[in-house]
Image (cartoon, rainbow, N blue to C red):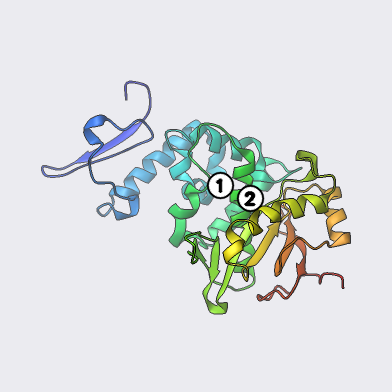
Amino acid sequence: MDNGDVALFAWTDGEAYWVGNTETPEVLWRTNKLALGDAPDGLGDWAERELGAQLREEEPWFADYEHLATFFLPVLCSKDGKDSTRTFFREHAAGFPDADREAGLTFYEDLLATGVFEEFRYTMAAKLGTSESQDLVRMRATMAEFNAAKLLADAGYGFTPEPGVDDGHHLDFRVPEADVLVEVTRPEPPSRRRAGTPAAALRQTVGGKTDGQLRVASEALLLVDATSFRDDEWAAVRDERPAVGHRPAVVYRFRPDGSREGYAVGDVPLAFDWLAPQPA
């Protein structure tokens, strides 16, 4: 394109297709929009190969994370979000504190290699956002949904993202076999907020959920992802095991090597055999 952005075109005598990470030309504003997977055979694959090659040329380190790069390609090559999302992976270890890029990205590479989200790729990839500004809080919160999916998958549960509830809200997951709704929240640690203690940081964040999505779906399981907490902050939570203002809940933290610790709050309707109970 004239501004240096890349767009791909394919056409026959009767049809034409355009995809690009640039501003859509006005002449194409009213054309039909298709997901890459809904394009004619081979066309979406070709476009993804070309965009993937461009991504690896511009960010060669993505070659070590094939599944992650492919899964998030729609945002990594988006017009507005490519810089912010690439920076999130390149410089912020996908949200893991005190971890380098290799450790953080390998965690998600291994998760996505299982195909756990393949059916819901566009729904989940888009959550990372296509904004020019980098909102690390929101991005870390998005990755909390991937962490929650790993908890569910590792425990042998299938799930569906974005189930609706009666008031028009959507929660994060439904586990059909147990008929359980799941909402996820990721507190920012006290070092990044005014909360005086790690327990207060948990309660403040959960309070936002109980006033919002969980007001109607009060029976939903709340997964409280404390992955953003440093070792010392998490140790305080692990030792105290505080209530968080909602039952049932699971409070947990992942590390990039896949290890996790956590505890239950109330009668958790799903089986996680590694959980510690909440103190009486």
Where is residue 156 shown, x and y percent of the image? Answer: 60, 74
Q: Is residue 191 visible to the viewer in this orientation of the structure?
A: yes
Q: Quadrant of residue 207?
A: bottom right
Q: CA distance from mark 1 to mark 2?
A: 7 Å
| Residue positioned most to the top | 2
Front residue (pair 53, 248): 248
Q: Is residue 220 above or below residue 210?
A: below
Locate the N terminus by quadrant.
Answer: top left
As shown in the figure, which amino acid type bears the numbered disc 2?
Thr
Q: Which residue is mark 1?
A: 65
Q: Which sits earlier in the primary sequence, circle 1 or circle 2? A: 1
Q: Quadrant of residue 137?
A: top right
Does 205 sit left or right of 19 as displayed?
right
Q: Which residue is mark 2?
A: 106
For residue 12, which numbered disc appears in the image? none
| Residue positioned most to the bottom | 177
Q: Quadrant of residue 263?
A: bottom right
Where is residue 62 shown, x and y percent of the image? Answer: 54, 41
Q: Is residue 149 visible to the viewer in this orientation of the structure?
A: no
Does 247 sit left or right of 131 as displayed?
right
Seen at 63% across and 58% down, the residue is 184
Disc 1 residue crowd, few under 14, some 14–19, many 20+, Cα 10 Å:
some
Locate the C terminus by quadrant.
Answer: bottom right
Label pair 1/2, CB-CB below 8 angstroms: yes
SS class, disc 1: loop
Q: Is residue 59 above or below residue 129?
A: above
